[in-house]
Image: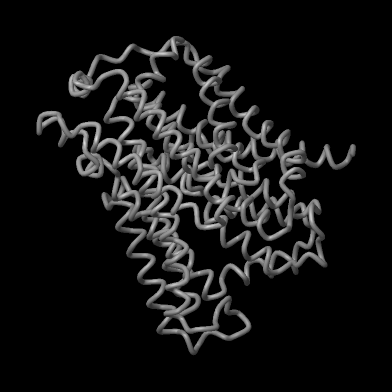
Amino acid sequence: MYIAMAIVFVLGFAAIIFEHKIHINKAASALFTAVVCWVLFVLGEHSILPESVGLITGGIESDLMHHLGEIGGILFFLLGAMTIVELIDAHSGFSLITQKITTTKKSKLLVTLAIITFFMSAALDNLTTSIIMAALLRKLIHEKNDLWIFSGIVIIAANAGGAWSPIGDVTTIMLWVGGQVTAANIVLKLLLPSMVCLAVPLTIVAMRMKGNLAVAPESGKNSEHAQIELREQKLVLFMGLGALLFVPIFKTTTHLPPFLGMLFGLSILWGVTEFLHKRKVESTRKQLSISAVLEKVDTPSILFFLGILLAVAALQSAGHLTQLAQFQDTHIGNVWAINVIVGFLSSIIDNVPLVAGSIGMYDLSAYPQDNVFWELLAYCAGTGGSCLIIGSAAGVAIMGILKIDFIWYLKKITPLAIIGYLSGVATFWLINLIF
């Protein structure tokens, strides 16, 4: 059953990759893979040797519920963020931003958006930032190929920006909270490698990109916004962005999970918009309500996220990921090679269990705080996920929102992401060699 779980995961992964060939939604494949992996785990519980198991204190069901609690926090965070973004969009809030972007030159716009994404991701996190940028890209770019290329660079920028900030990515948060790295040191050591990770692919694409963006025709959606006053647009935009910016403050202050801060911000915005439109005609009030906005949220993408994380959790609990980490440690040994491989693996397997496995394998006596091992792990786990579109939360979110094809990303963006990723590693190596 242990081997069967790995086979099912690989087949499910293949079904996700070839979604458009087999005409089965990736969410269905992910959910099916997750359930079958856990069923096989239960059926083979007694045949899996204890030394190869990454579990087990309270049984498989208890472990499943533990994983579901962590995954649920991510999903509610994602749902809250997507709802806030859709609510801003329904109130034409993003048009206030897009009106300020006057350039139509593709290369200049690409560089501008990439830099904004990079620093916004460090202040918020890469998932929230990618959702916001996806909404902006939908407003600015209407030609599919351009939209997808811009989105690919945004994914790289979001992950690179999250890697050097202690609150920019869930893995850096794990290492920061666990005491493996300090906030000031992670910024100092990883800022330049992360900038190089983005700058290399960004330069390549910007140099290739010629011409101007076509001016998109006004859509019928804009007429729906005619009844919204400018002050209402500004209020919802600033409150929505404020709610998103509040999340890391909430996390730092209360030490509670980030999804609670996101839901708190959503609840405030919900109440304000209900009060704002209470005197308007029924059709307008209904159109701008949270109920209408929730209908626009991409539920299949959330279910896909649930399925893929549950499937990975099954492999983590059964010991596949721990065994993989031990194999690396035994047969490779070199901390640089191990972390580079972890980065590539994070584009296939969620980086959270990979980092959790590394933290479990090596304590602070082996590698003390702010050791090069932990710093490189933070960079590699944070940026390596860009190599595949399903390798990071940012990629999964943008894939769902903008309907990007996996194979297209593999051909067009993956080589650029790999070049940027390895360039950042080389930069980090030079920094440590010099200083």
Residue 230 at x, y percent in the picture? 30, 18
Image location (x, y in percent) of residue 233: 32, 24
Could you say which quadrant of the image residue 215 lies in? top left
Q: Nearer the viewer, residue 84 or 318?
A: 84
Drawn side of residue 159 relative to residue 88, left or right: right
187 versus 277 height, above or below: below
Residue extending farthest to the right is 434
Looking at the image, residue 289 sits to the left or right of residue 352; the answer is: left
Residue 229 placement (x, y as % from top left): 26, 19
**Residue drawn 74% across the image and 53% down it:** 181
Q: Which residue reaches farthest bottom? A: 46
Residue at 58% x, 47% y: name it: 169
Number of numbered markers: 0
Viewer-proximal residue, 185 or 52?
Answer: 185
Q: Left or right: 385 with respect to 328?
A: left
Q: Is residue 350 above or below residue 109?
A: below
Q: Quick one: quadrant of the C terminus?
A: top right
The image's colour scheme reads one colour
Viewer-closest of 417 and 290? 290
Residue 294, given in percent of the width and then of the height, sits at 25, 44
Residue that appears at 42% across and 80% down: 61
Q: Residue at x 79, y 52 (%)?
A: 370
Camera-side residue of 110 and 64: 64
* Residue 15 to residue 50: above or below: above
- Which of the 4 image quarters holds residue 219? top left
